[in-house]
Amino acid sequence: MRPAKAYDLRILAAAALLQIAIVASVLVLSTMYLVCSEARRIRKLFYLEPDDCISFEELADVYPGFEPVRAAEPEQLVDIGSPSQRANAASPALSRSASGARRTNVD
């Protein structure tokens, strides 16, 4: 058996690196194929043709009397007190009127 020469080792190292590069390339390309095919499947599942889309004008026709809710102006807001004040106001002892009759939501 003859001794290994330096260029023989370099050829073996280059061949090993080439095999690693080929395996890595196959893994990357197959992963990209799987990702793209899944994206195509999802797009096909959820894609709407332009005729299938619903516009806001069509929704306005469905609910003609619907007015959008506007945020209250700061001067229109009512102070309801702290959480402890609200809890005390809801207690049965404080929910009686001056005459002693119990107040209800219908009062």
Image (cartoon, rainbow, N blue to C red):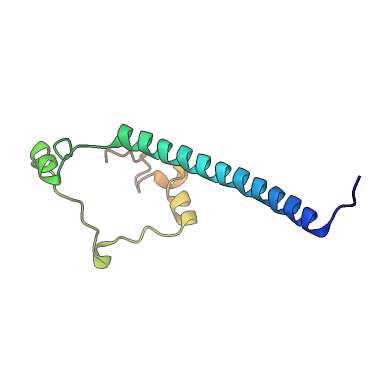
Q: Residue at x 69, y 49 (%)?
A: 15
Question: Image point 8% across, 41% down: which residue?
Answer: 64
Q: Residue at x 21, y 56 (%)?
A: 70
Relative to 1, 29 lies left or right: left
Query: Which residue is the extreme one toward the bottom?
Result: 75
Q: Position of residue 59 (x, y in %)?
A: 14, 40
Residue 49, image quadrant: top left
Q: Position of residue 4 (x, y in %)?
A: 86, 52
Q: Is residue 17 left or right of residue 87?
A: right
Could you say which is closer to the camera, residue 81 or residue 63? Answer: 63
Q: Considering depth in this image, is 95 or 52 the residue closer to the camera?
A: 52
Task: Describe residue 80's horizontal placement relative to residue 2 as left or right.
Answer: left
Q: Quadrant of the C terminus?
A: top left
Residue 40, position as x, y percentages in the image: 36, 37
- Is residue 43 placed above or below 5 in the rendered structure? above
For residue 27, side relative to residue 85 (left or right) = right
Instruction: From the viewer's side, name the closer residue of 1 and 14.
Output: 1
Image quarter (top left, top right, bottom left or bottom right) of the N terminus:
top right
Identify the residue at horizontal 27%, vertical 66% (top origin). 74
